[in-house]
Amino acid sequence: MKTRAKDLVGKVIVSEETGRKFGVVGDLSFVPDSGELLHVVLVEPTKHTGDLALEKDENNRLMIPFSSVKSIGDFVIISEKEIV
């Protein structure tokens, strides 16, 4: 089953390694021509996001590389060790 981008917005982002919550999916950034997903834009960040070296978008929102997303279900599971 395919997951639509709008279905990701509002899901909680959780670490695969520690189970810590990092915030909520606020948006996705992608390449318009190809549709390749680049980042998950984080809203409502928790204090644990300070432990990660995350890029920020033009609105100063934290971004998690989409390559670190491991699975999507009730939560968006990310791998902390793959965020560089």
Image (cartoon, rainbow, N blue to C red):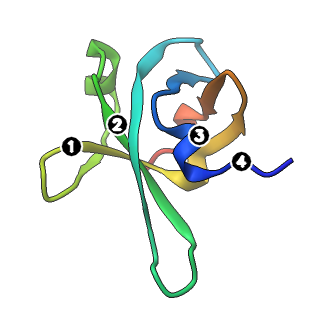
Sequence order check, earlier mark of 3 and 2: 3
Q: Say what secondary structure mark 3 lies in.
A: helix
User: Badge 3: few (under 14), some or many (20 or more) residues near its Cα, within 10 Å?
Assistant: few
Q: Which mark is residue 22?
A: none
Please, which residue is most extreme toward the left here?
59
> Do tag 1 and tag 3 residues touch (Cβ < 8 Å)?
no
Q: Residue at x 57, y 83 (%)?
A: 34
Confirm or deny contact between disc 2 and disc 1 (CB under 8 A).
yes
Position of 21 with respect to 69 (left or right) is left
Q: In which quarter of the image is residue 8?
A: top right
Q: x and y percent of residue 3 in the render?
A: 71, 47
Q: To which residue does mark 3 refer?
A: 7
Q: Which amino acid does label 1 sit on?
A: Arg
Question: For numbered disc 2, what is the local secondary structure?
Answer: strand
Q: Which of marks 2 and 4 is in front?
A: 4
Q: Is residue 9 visible?
A: yes
Residue at x 12%, y 51% (from the top left corner): 59
Going 56% across and 51% down the picture, which residue do you hit?
Answer: 5
Q: Which amino acid does label 4 sit on?
A: Thr
Task: Name the residue tied to disc 2.
Answer: 42
Q: Residues within 10 Å of mark 2 (few under 14, many from 20)?
A: many
| Residue 3, label in figure | 4
Q: At 70% from the left edge and 35% from the top edge, which residue is drawn?
A: 72
Query: Is label 3 or label 2 in front?
Result: 3
Choose the circle earlier in sequence order: 2 or 4: 4
Residue 20 position, x and y percent, is: 50, 12
